[in-house]
């Protein structure tokens, strides 16, 4: 049997209802906060991701699904949504009348990581981006939105970690200090880090290899060498969050796996998912729109790991799998033919119905109605056809009532709609 691709997964009925509910909660909340939905392609030119996420990142170096198409153009299945949204913002001049735009999208992303619990090669993100606002208000607003969504979904074991990654003003001095530090611990670094330490020393701080994590434990922290503007920006974000009663921790060690960040970076972390602790991550990227060929427009956003969020929500909430409203139990060919017509008419009138298409005893049909969790069963056999009266049974209360044979659809629509 052909199995699905390793690290990919099916979302089956039963689980889908929960996903739909989460999606509705997230989309509703984002729309309340003024976001509009954007739908971007699942593939882009490889260069877009390489230039925005960064050539030296794990995502670009090791995890992208990249291939040459028939004309030899390098294409990549999107590993994240931010780069594409920025591309669309520039390409369609969404800044033309007003640079301030709030956009969100929900969909699958692809990263060829080692699969494990909470980590997949196709996973879903709920992604939100705000363009055109440099002030720290929106940084706090995005974190308030994330905290509110978790709250509405009943997810409690969550901590927001916040850090500042500085700006082109304060980064060079930090880079120098970090490089000097990394030279001293070079003997303990992995091959990737040795290679990256000159080109992009910040990446070393994000390495997952235990030896590297230990080696950089005493590394200087960007948060300690912020310029005045970055410091003020970060302090304001923290004050605004505290003022709204949002529980968060300032975490000097939070670096993020993507190169485009400036100033505020944040993650929602949980203890509920073992090693994969990040449920959402985001931050400011004030230089990316310009770097990709657009005007100088500041921006900030986040992405929620939908799969991870759904795994946590599934523990606290089981949405009921809705069964059909009516199961039509028919005995005999004539009854079955009529049942089929009612089944079609009911569905067309917006009432889900089910029936047994083959010859089955009443007992086995009632069992099936039970298994499907039907709210009502309509029973029709020879004697009902003769009397012109059918029985409608409420499966929960066990009450029965009579329905006239020639008014089945109208009666059920009136009663159940
Ligand atoms: P990210 O931290 O790479 O950020 O991903 C965001 C979230 O996606 C993670 O916190 C995690 O929950 C989920 N995620 C990532 N990789 C996987 C995986 N292999 N399996 C399951 N879930 C995963 C970004 O993608 C940025 N684009 C966020 C952003 C938006 N920054 C600014 N705007």
Image (tube, rainbow, N blue to C red):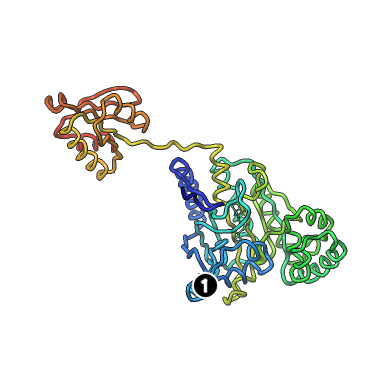
368 sits left or right of 182 in the view: left
User: How many neighbours does mark 1 have within 10 angstroms: few (below 14), some (14-19), or many (20 or more)?
Assistant: some
- Identified at 23% across, 42% down, the residue is 344
Residue 410 screen position, x and y as percent: 19, 37
Q: Nearer the viewer, residue 31 or 171?
A: 171
Q: Is mark 1 within 8 Å of ligand 1?
A: no
Residue 175, visible in the rendered structure: yes
Q: Secondary structure at mark 1?
A: loop
Q: Nearer the viewer, residue 401 or 216?
A: 216
Above-or-below relation of 354 to 402: below
Q: Image quadrant of residue 336?
A: top left
Residue 343 screen position, x and y as percent: 24, 39
Seen as rendered, the residue at the extreme front is 1
Give the quarter the ligand 1 occupies: bottom right
- Identified at 48% across, 55% down, the residue is 31
List the residue tagged with mark 1.
95
Above-or-below relation of 215 to 309: below
Q: Image quadrant of residue 260?
A: bottom right
326 sits left or right of 341 in the view: right
Question: How many labels were placed on the picture?
Answer: 1
Quarter containing the C terminus = top left
Residue 135, visible in the rendered structure: no
Residue 357 screen position, x and y as percent: 25, 36
Seen as rendered, the residue at the extreme left is 386
């Amino acid at each position: 049997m052909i199995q699905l691709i390793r690290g990919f997964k099916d979302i089956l009925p039963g689980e889908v209802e929960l996903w739909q509910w989460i999606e509705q909660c997230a989309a509703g909340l984002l729309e309340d906060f003024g976001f509009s939905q954007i739908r971007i392609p699942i593939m882009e030119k490889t260069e877009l991701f390489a230039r925005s996420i960064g050539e030296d990142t794990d995502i670009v170096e090791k995890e992208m699904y990249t291939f040459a198409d028939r004309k030899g153009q390098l294409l990549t299945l999107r590993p994240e949504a931010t780069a594409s949204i920025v591309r669309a913002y520039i390409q369609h001049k969404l800044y033309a009348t007003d640079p301030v735009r709030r956009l969100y999208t929900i969909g699958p992303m692809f990263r060829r990581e080692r699969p494990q619990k909470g980590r997949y090669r196709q996973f879903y993100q709920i992604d939100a981006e705000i363009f055109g606002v440099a002030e720290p208000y929106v940084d706090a607003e995005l974190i308030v939105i994330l905290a509110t969504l978790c709250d509405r979904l009943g997810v409690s074991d969550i901590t927001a970690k916040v850090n500042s990654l500085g700006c082109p003003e304060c980064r060079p001095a930090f880079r120098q200090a970090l490089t000097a530090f990394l030279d001293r611990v070079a003997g303990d670094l992995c091959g990737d880090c040795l290679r990256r330490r000159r080109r992009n020393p910040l990446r070393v701080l994000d390495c997952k290899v235990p030896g590297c994590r230990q080696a950089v434990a005493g590394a200087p922290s960007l948060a300690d060498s912020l310029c005045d503007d970055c410091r003020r920006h970060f302090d304001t974000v923290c004050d605004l969050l505290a003022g709204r009663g949002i529980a968060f921790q300032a975490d000097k060690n939070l670096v993020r796996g993507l190169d485009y960040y400036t100033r505020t970076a944040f993650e929602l972390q949980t203890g509920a998912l073992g090693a994969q602790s990040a449920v959402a991550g985001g931050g400011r990227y004030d230089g990316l729109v310009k770097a990709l060929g657009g005007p100088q427009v500041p921006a900030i956003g986040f992405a929620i790991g939908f799969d991870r969020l759904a795994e946590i929500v599934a523990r606290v909430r089981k949405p009921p799998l809705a069964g059909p409203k009516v199961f039509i139990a028919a005995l005999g060919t004539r009854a079955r033919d009529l049942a089929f017509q009612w089944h079609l008419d009911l569905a067309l009138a917006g009432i889900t119905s089910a029936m047994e298409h083959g010859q089955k005893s009443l007992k086995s049909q009632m069992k099936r109605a039970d298994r499907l969790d039907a709210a009502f069963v309509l029973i029709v056999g020879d004697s009902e056809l003769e009397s012109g009266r059918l029985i409608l049974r409420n499966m929960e209360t066990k009450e029965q009532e009579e329905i006239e044979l020639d008014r089945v659809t109208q009666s059920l629509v009136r009663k159940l709609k």
